[in-house]
Image (spheres, rainbow, N blue to C red):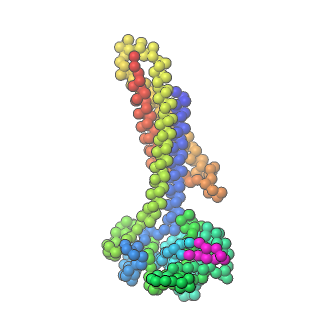
């Protein structure tokens, strides 16, 4: 009996701890994305370039809930430095970008490139840490990195006229997450030059709101702009990543259901052993008029008591372990960050309902084994 109680407690504790870690990781990644993703993002429904950009800007300027917006051009680019080459993501932004996104707080060294159109700043660029490391780029204005963009057109092209080229130097290195480690931030004029786009052009517009009325502002902008544009919230921008996190969490949950079922075999064994051990006493009770149904209910109740005791013990132990991890960071995700933990009522309910359901089910079928 004690073995089954301990097995259920350990399985419950493990399930609660793992779910709390996944909740912490999800919250950490959402917070990380909130620093680099805007509240709202406008994209064209078809094509890359936003049509009627002046019309879109007028709508955004007239909206009282919009604090700032920035025009963005994003495209893949071929990068070469000192005989080393990479495929990276180029993101051209205007002077309002840092008012919308807090990326300047994520720099390991240097600074964000100047995006003002007053000075000749077309050679400034900020590189993701992994990209800068692989290319070996120094933080030096004399060390130029070549950016190549294929030219549109038909027919036979030579090496000399197949690419648009621009030389930049690195002003800073930023560290965000795996998604942004191969990014290069440049002034939007640099991106327009590489893509042979007019000055008044953008692939997307990123928006920062004054308050958290995101849904109502999204609907308002959609209705004013029409069906040619899509307006995405932060969650919709991160939908693939969040979906992947949910799928991973679901698989972990299913694995732990199997673990709890296996642990519950000890419960089934304990109930059957109790039934066999108390067989003579059970016969005596039946001869005194006690019903078999009542005996089955009694053994079923014993299984419920074992299950509830194991769940309570496991939840208490899991709460203590997660509290220790949250406050002291005993288990590290890497050399500088502990695994994040999030206490959630949802996790408590999931663990309690799952273990209790399986325990009740196992107890019910095991108690039916009473037979004379």
Location of residue 22 with respect to 51 vertically, above or below: above
Q: Quadrant of residue 132?
A: bottom right
Please name the predominant secondary structure of the magenta segment in the image: strand
Residue at point 64% right, 77% down?
A: 81
Residue 136, given in percent of the width and then of the height, sits at 67, 72
Q: Residue at x 37, y 82 (%)?
A: 52
Q: How many marks?
A: 0
Q: Give the residue at x 49% y 38%.
A: 260
Looking at the rendered image, the quarter that the C terminus falls into is: top left
Q: Which residues are magenta?
A: 78-86
Of residue 134 and residue 228, the one placed in the foreground of this image is: 134
Eyeballing the image, is 225 above or below 335?
A: below
Determine if residue 29 is in view: yes
Residue 147: image location, x then y, percent? 57, 79
Q: Nearer the viewer, residue 351 or 270?
A: 270
Query: Which residue occupies 58% across, 53% down?
Result: 339
Q: Is residue 129 visible?
A: no
Q: Quadrant of residue 88?
A: bottom right
Q: Residue furthest front?
A: 156
Percent across and percent down for residue 289 are 35, 14
From the viewer's perspective, tell me whether residue 128 is left or right of residue 309: right
Q: Where residue 245 appears, x then y in whole percent? A: 48, 55
Whether residue 156 is in magenta: the answer is: no
Q: Is residue 132 left or right of residue 228?
A: right
Q: Taking 181 as reference, is 203 above or below it?
A: below
- With 336 as the anchor, is 365 left or right in this view? left
Does 85 appear in magenta? yes
């Amino acid at each position: 009996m004690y073995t089954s109680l301990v097995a259920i407690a350990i399985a419950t504790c493990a399930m609660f701890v793992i779910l709390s870690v996944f909740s912490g990781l999800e919250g950490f990644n959402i917070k990380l994305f909130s620093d680099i993703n805007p509240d709202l993002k406008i994209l064209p429904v078809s094509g890359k370039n936003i049509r009627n950009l002046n019309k879109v800007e007028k709508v955004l300027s007239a909206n009282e809930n919009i604090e700032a917006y920035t025009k963005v051009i994003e495209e893949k680019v071929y990068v070469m430095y000192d005989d080393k080459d990479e495929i990276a993501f180029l993101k051209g932004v205007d002077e309002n970008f840092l008012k919308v996104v807090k990326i300047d707080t994520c720099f390991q060294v240097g600074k964000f490139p100047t995006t003002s159109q007053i000075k000749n700043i077309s050679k400034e660029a900020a590189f993701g840490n992994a990209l800068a490391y692989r290319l070996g780029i120094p933080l030096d204005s004399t060390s130029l990195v070549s950016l190549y963009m294929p030219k549109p057109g038909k027919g036979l092209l030579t090496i000399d006229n197949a690419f648009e080229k621009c030389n930049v130097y690195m002003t800073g290195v930023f560290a965000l997450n795996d998604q942004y480690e191969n990014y290069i931030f440049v002034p939007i004029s640099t991106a327009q030059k590489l893509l042979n786009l007019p000055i008044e052009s953008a692939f997307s517009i990123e928006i920062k709101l004054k308050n958290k009325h995101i849904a109502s502002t999204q609907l308002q902008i959609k209705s004013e702009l029409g069906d040619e544009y899509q307006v995405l919230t932060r969650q919709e921008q991160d939908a693939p990543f969040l979906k992947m996190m949910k799928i991973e969490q679901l698989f972990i949950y299913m694995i732990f259901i199997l673990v709890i079922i296996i642990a519950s075999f000890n419960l089934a064994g304990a109930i059957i052993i109790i039934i066999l051990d108390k067989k003579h006493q059970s016969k005596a009770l039946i001869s005194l008029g006690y019903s078999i149904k009542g005996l089955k209910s009694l053994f079923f109740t014993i299984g419920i008591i074992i299950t509830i005791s194991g769940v309570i013990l496991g939840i208490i132990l899991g709460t203590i372990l997660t509290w220790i991890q949250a406050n002291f960071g005993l288990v590290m995700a890497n050399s500088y960050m502990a695994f994040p933990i999030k206490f959630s009522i949802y996790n408590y309910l999931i663990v309690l309902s799952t273990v209790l359901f399986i325990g009740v089910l196992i107890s019910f079928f095991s108690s039916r084994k009473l037979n004379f």
